[in-house]
Amino acid sequence: MAWSALPPAVLRCSVRDPRSQQAPCEHTEPRDGITTHATSDAIALSHVSRSFTIDGRRIDAVASTTMAITTGQIVAIVGPSGSGKSTLLRVISGLLPPDTGTVTLSGSPVSGPDERVGMVFQEPRLLPWRTAEDNVAFPLELRGEPKAARLARARELLALVGLSGFESARPHQLSGGMAQRVALARALALDPPVLLLDEPFGALDALTRDRLDAELLGLWERIGTTIVLVTHSIPEAVFLADRVLVLSARPGRVVADVPVDLERPRRWESLDALASGSAASTVRRALEAHASIDA
Ligand code: ADP
Ligand code: MG
């Protein structure tokens, strides 16, 4: 089952405009086990920088970066290889402390690995000896949830990403796209208001990627999670996002903030047209102007 084919019963707010500054719902509350996030949550970075030392040489990965992301928005980040995109996501998630600056989620600071953030990487990073449902349930296990409850939740999430019937499959039995669906389900296990996706479909073939992009939108329309997605694909960024942030070559700075003023719901069939649309060409020009590649 495709994600977009899911019943709207999981929706708490049937009508939501992610571009609106106003919270479309008053509060969040579980419904059918799925919580929607549509309050005044936001991600805010203030003067965040981060450097590394490699062989005694200092590498500035992220320069002083300030940004705010409205609750329920999808924001895409594009930038040259090595421009600090992954570093930025790791700082937002609390996995990596910034050298300077602060990160807040819904106004409260991130000070270490934060349960309010779910992450998906380019590779699924599943535990190979565990079944799909045990992988999805893993964060709940770490939190000490009883077995029956965490398995019920894992099954529900696998259904949400279109993987009913694959609960007992092990990672080596899954296609790349299916494994990424499991990784996404696991990222949603703790019901985070923020989802960070670091080139999540970048290793997949183009058709699978297009399909997963469309299904990700269907999923987002239901749960309303704030999403920050790193991608190298301009069409993917424009198709998914409300805003595209363009980073300069290292150290990454935001050099363009391009709104994507396209109606939602967006459909897969419109993807090709978006690649040559005006938002895409603005992003492409900004990238070309600032792309001195690190690789
Ligand atoms: P991107 O995701 O945009 O390709 P990264 O954030 O992965 O870029 O990396 C930005 C820069 O920081 C690169 O030059 C990379 O070598 C360096 N870097 C990232 N992580 C580490 C690390 N853990 N140790 C040392 N250097 C790192
Ligand atoms: Mg990266």
Image: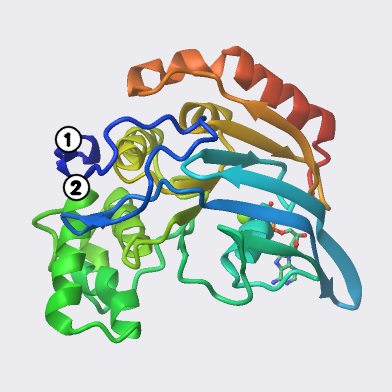
User: Is the shortest distance between ligand 2 and the CB of mark 1 under 8 Å?
Assistant: no
For marks 2 and 1, give the one nearer the viewer: 1
Q: Position of residue 246 (x, y in %)?
A: 71, 37
Q: How many C-alpha atoms fall within 10 Å of the one at disc 1: few (<14), some, or many (≥20)?
A: few
Residue 198 lies, in percent from the top left, at 53, 53
Q: How far apart are marks 2 and 1 (CA)?
A: 9 Å
Tell me if I can see residue 52 in this picture.
Answer: yes
Q: Could you tell me which residue is drawn at 34 percent across and 83 percent down?
A: 143
Q: In which quarter of the image is the N terminus?
A: top left
* Residue positioned 82% across, 51% down in the render: 250
* Amino acid of disc 1: Ala
Q: In the rendered view, tell whether residue 83 sits above or below residue 98.
A: above
Residue located farthest toward the left when viewing the structure as drawn: 165
Question: Foreground residue, 30 or 217?
Answer: 30
Say what secondary structure mark 1 lies in: helix
Q: In this view, does 50 lie above or below 138?
A: above
Give the left or right position of residue 193, taking residue 257 as reference. Answer: left
Is residue 243 positioned above or below 220 on the image? above
Residue 127 position in % (x across, y down)? 33, 75
Element assignment for label 2: loop
Q: In this view, does 39 lie above or below 107?
A: above
Is residue 247 shown left or right of residue 126?
right
From where the camera sits, is residue 295 visible? no
Tag of residue 269: none
Label 2 crowding class (10 Å Cα cut-off): few <14, some 14-19, many 20+? many
Residue at left 16%, top 59%? 156
Task: Classify residue 184 as left or right of residue 173.
Answer: right
Determine which of the numbered discs, if any, sits on residue 162 in the image. Answer: 2
Q: Circle 1 sits on which residue?
A: 5
